[in-house]
Image (spheres, grey):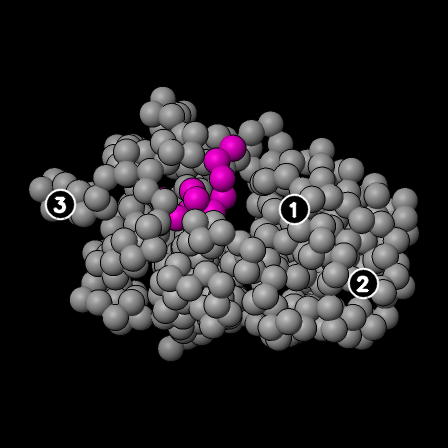
Amino acid sequence: MRFEHESLPQRVCFGAGEAAALVRAEVERLGAARLMVIAAPAEAGLAEKTTVGLPVAVRFDEVVMHVPVEVAERARAAAARHEADLIVSVGGGSTTGLAKAVALTSGLPIVAVPTTYAGSEATSVWGLTERARKTTGVDARVLPRSVVYDATLTLSLPVPMSVASGLNALAHCVDTMWAPRADPINSAFAVEGIRALTSGLPTVAAEPGGLAGREVLLYGAYLSARAFSSAGSGLHHKICHVLGGACDLPHAQTHAVVLPYVLAFNAAAAPEAERRMAVAFGTASAVEGLRQLRSAVDAPRALRDYGFGEADIEAVIPAILKAVPVGNPRPVTAGELRQLLRAAWRGDDPQVIMAEEGGA
């Protein structure tokens, strides 16, 4: 074996029902005296309970999907105006993403408190959208210094959103297996993440009020994000980033829909990665494992259900082709990408892609 692996410096705290105490401990440990709390209006109550008694200088609630540049600028201005010395983000990926946008230019440390399974809290990846184009990058300044995982904060997340968010985390794991910087360590995180998410998702779908499944999902989401942050963006994420920025599609649902098609497209060209994923799913093949999981949790099915039009397919193909990672297990042509996107738009069985490949 010959590889290089970089581990990210971050403190992770797990504790159901302990968010407020854990956040307080992290704020004190980091020596902060003027907090900026970022939380969408829907999470305002959770954020107040989580930061009760702490020195909050400003609360910012303008959280928008895909982090538009103009929103990021307003948040940065608020942080500077109130002389914040630490950010506490309480919410999902969009909330964490906005905190990262502020940290990117200010260097302020972040204590992230996730309420979904997005995984953004465990990566050094940032993303901003301007004029329907989403730009992403990697910067050590945006990695939260601390993450507080409290499964009770996810109990209000409806099952459909929990499923989409959990499948988004699963996409991190799958993409890691053939990403540009894939190595034995981040692959091990990804495989264990697949196992955990495959276990936790059906449990949450069947028992949404229980903590056991949600704790397993948070564990799997953390592993998936660690793997993804280390390995980099593979084909799946390149496709979804273009779709999200160009068409303003919902993040988690887009990942949930596109994932089985990218897996079906790449699996045969990456037999060792496919074998390891199949073992984690507990099925004969990774494609079949994902199919069974999606069926069990009533996963999102088609891009057309979320605002993606058939006419949009041709519009996004050039941008996706430019973004395809050089090391993808197999080359990607415009025709193949068109076929993949059309199948995802309709919600076809991903096996159709494999069958058509075999007949080509």
CA distance for labels 3 and 1: 44 Å
Judge from the rendering whether residue 119 lies leftward or rightward of residue 89; answer left or right: left
Residue furthest to the left? 359
Quadrant placement of the N terminus: bottom left
Q: Residue at x 85, y 64 (%)?
A: 54
Magenta stretch holds residue 93: no
Q: Which residues are magenta?
A: 248-257
User: Where is mark 3, residue-wise?
Assistant: 355
Out of 191 and 20, give the one closest to the viewer.
20
User: Where is mark 2, residue-wise?
Assistant: 52
Q: Amino acid at mark 3?
A: Ala
Magenta stretch holds residue 254: yes
Most prominent secondary structure in the magenta stretch? helix
Residue 42 got which mark? 1
Quadrant placement of the C terminus: top left
Label 3 packing within 10 angstroms: few (<14), some (14-19), many (20+): few
Disc 2 + disc 1, Cβ < 8 Å:
no
Earlier in the chain: of badge 2 and badge 1, it is 1
Q: Residue at x 86, y 70 (%)?
A: 31
Tag 3, which secondary structure?
A: helix
